[in-house]
Image: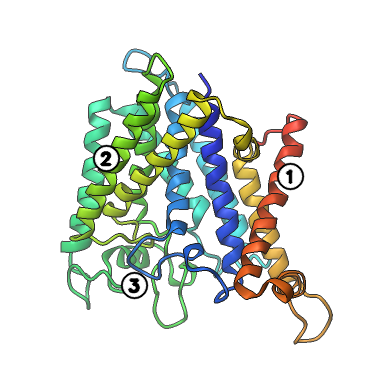
Amino acid sequence: MRLTSLDVFRGIAIAGMILVNMASIAAPNVYPPLLHADWNGCTPTDLVFPFFLFIVGVAMSFSLSKYTDTNKPRASLYWRIFRRAAILFGLGLLLNGFWNYDFTTIRIMGVLQRISLSYLLASLIILNLPRKGQWIMAGVLLIGYWLAMMYIPVPGYGAGELTRVGNFGAFIDRLIIPKAHLYGWDGFQNMGDPEGVFSTIPAVVSVLAGYFTGGWIRSKREINSQTSMDLVLFGLSCLIIGGIWDLAFPLNKKLWTSSYVIFTTGWALLLLAACYELIEVRRVRRWGKPLEVLGLNAIFVFVASILLIKILVKTKIGVGEKAPSTYNWIYENLFASWAGGFNGSFLFALVTVVLWIAVAYGMYKRQWFVKV
C-alpha cells in the first residue's frame, strides 16, 4: 500500500526546509515565523525538521513491515541500513565543508547527520524489540534525556542549567567532538550545537513516533474520515502533553527537548490528518501534486538546494572587496528593490521553492528517482 498523502507530507517538509533556509540568509529582514526561536519556544520554522524525521519513521513502517518476530531480518538488511546511514552522514559532511573542505575545522554534525543517526538507531530498535518494547524504549529515551539534562551536574555550571553553554548536552558534545568541529565554536567557548550528538537521543523518538503512526495507519482496513479524526485527537493530545511538559522542560529545538518531541509530533499528526483527509478520503489531489513530486526526490532536492544556497552566498557579482555576493545582488536588485526587505526575502525564498518544484517535476516526468 502506498499513500500519496505521505509523499505530499514529505514534500511539505522539504518545501519548508528550502523556504526557511533561503529566507534566513536575508536576516534581519525576515518575517519572525520564518526564523527559529532564539532559544526556548517554538515557531513554525521549528516544526520543519521534526516533521521530516516523523515522515522518515512513517516510511519505515512500510519498508520494514514484513519483518516480524517470526521473519527476522537478515544481515543484508542491516548492511543496507548502515550503508544508507553512512551515505546520509557523508552527504552532511559534503554540505558542511562545501566548498573549502578544511578537515581541521569542518563541522561534524548537521541536519543530514542527525537524520542518519536517528534513522539508524530507530531501525535497530524496531528490528530488535517487539512493539511493546519499542514503546517502552521511546519512553525511556524521552524521560532519560529529561532527567539527564535536568539533574546531572555539569562541571562549572551545576545541574539543570539549560543555557547554551552550560547544558549537559553541550558538555557531552564537547567531550566527544573536538571543539573546532562543533557548530558555534568561536575560539573561546562552544555555544552549543543544534544538531549535537547527545540531543540526537530524543530525536530518535521523533522517528519512532512516525513509525508508530504509520503502523497504525497500515492496520486500518478502510480509508475513511474516522482515521483522520483519530489522528487529530492523537495530535491534540500530544500538543497538550507537550505543552504541560514545557512547564518543567521547556520547548527547545536546539536542545531537542522531550517536550519539543511530543509537541512537534502533535503538529505532525495534525498535518498528516489534513493530508490524509483531503487526498486519501476526499480524493482532492490536484493541489498536492507539486508537493508530491518534491517529496519523491526529497533528499536529492534538499542536498542540491543547500549547495545552491552556498554557491549563491560564496560567489560574487563584480570584483573587489565590496562586490556583493550573488545572493545579495539578486535579493537587492530583483526583490527588495520593489517589494521591500521583508517581502523581498520571502518572495526570493518562495521563488526558490517553485524552482525546485519545477526541477522535481522534470525528474518525475522522466521517472528519475534518486534513492539513498
Element type at mark 1: helix
- In depth, the one of 207 and 179 nearer the eye is 207
Residue 368 is situated, as x and y percent measured from the top left of the image, at: 73, 33
Q: Is residue 152 above or below residue 92?
A: below
Label 1 amino acid? Answer: Ala
Which residue type does callout 2 highlight?
Answer: Ala
User: For numbered disc 3, what is the local secondary structure?
Assistant: loop
Residue 153 on image: x %, y %: 18, 68
In terms of sequence position, does the residue under pointer 2 or pointer 3 come before the other?
A: 2
Q: Residue at x 35, y 24 (%)?
A: 226
Question: Are the residues at dot 1 and dot 3 in contact (C-beta closer than 8 Å)?
Answer: no
Which residue position holds label 3? 164
Residue 331 occupies which quadrant of the picture? bottom right
Say whether disc 2 or disc 1 marks the residue closer to the N-terminus. 2
Which mark, residue 119? Answer: none
At label 3, which amino acid type do we have?
A: Arg
User: Dot 1 corresponds to which residue?
Assistant: 358
Where residue 140 sits: x, y (%)? 21, 43
Mark found first going from the N terminus, 1 or 3: 3
Q: Residues within 10 Å of mark 1 (few under 14, many from 20)?
A: some
The one of 110 and 354 positioned closer to us in this rendering:
354
Which callout, 2 or 1, points to the residue nearer the camera?
A: 1
